[in-house]
Amino acid sequence: MTLFMAIPLLVVASAMLHPDRETWRHLAENVLVGLVRNTLLLTLGVSLATAVLGTGLAWLTAVCEFPGRRLFAWSLMLPLALPAYVTGFVLVGLLDFTGPVQTFLREVFGPNLRLPPIRSGGGAALALTLALYPYVYLLARNAFLSQGRRALEVGQSLGLSRRQGFLRIALPMARPWIAGGVALVAMETLADFGTVAVFNYDTFTTGIYKAWYSLFSLPAAAQLASVLMLIVLVVLLVEQHLRSGMRYTQTGRASQARERIVLRGAAAWGASLMCAAVLAAAFVVPVGQLAVWTLEVAARDLDSRYWAYLARSLLLASSAGLLIAGVALLMAYARRHHPDTLMNVMVRIATLGYAVPGAVLAIGIYLPIAWFDHAYVALMRELFARDAAPLLSGTLAAMLSAYLVRFLAVAYEPVSAALQRITPSMDEAARSLGLTGRQLLARVHLPLLRGGVLTAALLVFVDVMKEMPITLMTRPFGWDTLATRIFEMTSEGEWERAALPAVALVLAGLAPVILLTRQTER
């Protein structure tokens, strides 16, 4: 399995054996330093912001009681259904110099008013933070809900205040889940292209695309991608080092409804205001603007094609969710039973694809598939003296293979975190009662892993619904989805017409997001 997952990465890396030296020298002398600086600054900024925002919101909605908590507990997950590139072009439309916000402010405070430009690294970081914080929020909230209050009560009995209990007990215990969410955010940021392109902020991915489409040099693009993979590997090794040698087990699961910390006065309304502000910026305002644009074009654009776009998007997302969650479960089990260095390295290699830009990964999948089909056609001609149709090129199998490589890390993190809660003592207790092999798996492990596996499948579902480059480059002929429709409209500068498929994409993604929220409540 690791070899299969590594093939597209090896295909991309093999391009370094045939370097386009002139193009590579031009990149190294003119843009490489800037790309590395911008990429690292953006990744660090988004990772830090999502860690603080996601963890803080998770703590408030999981442990505290304040006005509107029940509403915010599930609604703060809604931005997961909104692609970052959609949030980005809505923010640009609203906050650019000619947008309604700056226009209104100049009318109030005078024409000389100048605000920081939204088309910048800060703007890209803002859009990515608003779109990606739910990854941290979901996993951190799951951790806080499952911790129980026993550990905090023990801390309070030892003289710790609530703040000290959060910093010294609850936060360290939730660290594997928070680190997993931040790792997903970091890899998503490293691989992002659509959002940074909207804000005209050059990163490694834009450099790869420019080398590919502007210079028509696939080797140069592949070399930049290999450097990007090296950065990702360093990030993953650091994250793994931080989590190594630590064991986290559940300390109790009492009724949170009776045991939440009740906030009062300014603290309670401050918590409500913070949750409302994040929800408005990340979901309500972008969706409201999309709705306005949609009403302007719906009478002209809405027809039966959108049902086909929706059906194809749902079929792809559900198939990929089931497939990838199953593979993640197998891989997490293999690592649990063989926790040696070789297995750790194999797992890390298999989950590197999430940080590789989708278009580059599509090429890494396409080239070996094209080679296989060419060999198959030649063999059929040799054996039966007739032409045969290619087996894999332009098929759903090719698309699902690319999704598997791309999103395995998304599914692996929650499954792995759930598996950490099954302690060796649980296995020993089950074996002492006569359960072995499949019985242990069916009657003990799978019920305990059900939440993590469902979370993994739903996260993959939402990501595949929003995925654009792989779908564009590996889809069968005529197989348009909601994401490809958005690309067609935005590439022509038709922001208003892109709002219609974007709204459909958001609506289709709401159901799994709500299921994710209910899952965390259990």
Image (spheres, helix red, strand yellow):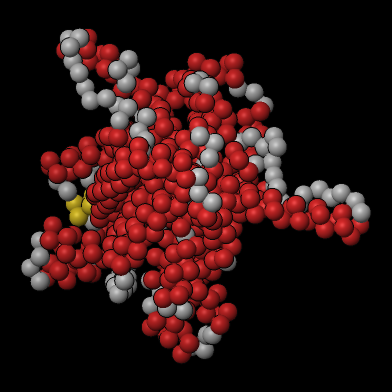
Which residue occupies the extreme front position in the image?
22
Q: Residue 385's x, y, as percent?
A: 92, 54
Q: Is residue 12 above or below residue 114?
A: below
Q: Residue at x 39, y 26 (%)?
A: 90
Residue 250 occupies quadrant: bottom left
Image coords of residue 138 (percent x, y): 37, 52
Quadrant in the rendering for residue 414: bottom left
Quadrant position of the N terminus in the picture = bottom right
Query: Quick one: which residue is furthest to the left in this view?
Result: 159
Residue 35 is situated, as x and y percent measured from the top left of the image, at 35, 41
Q: Quadrant of the C terminus?
A: bottom left
Q: Residue at x 70, y 47 (%)?
A: 393
Please tell me whether residue 5 is drawn above or below residue 511 in the rendered image.
below
Q: Residue at x 43, y 71 (%)?
A: 344
Instruction: Report the label total.
Output: 0
Asked whether, in this view, residue 206 is left or right of residue 390, the answer is left
Q: Nearer the viewer, residue 117 or 320?
A: 117
Furthest residue to the right? 385
Q: Is residue 372 visible?
A: yes
Seen in the image, is 129 located left or right of residue 12?
A: left
Of residue 425 and residue 130, the one placed in the foreground of this image is 130
Which residue is rendered at x = 44% and y = 82% of the image? 427
Q: Residue 416, how many percent across, how many down?
A: 43, 66
Q: Of residues 515 and 347, which is closer to you in this image?
A: 347
Q: Is residue 42 visible?
A: no
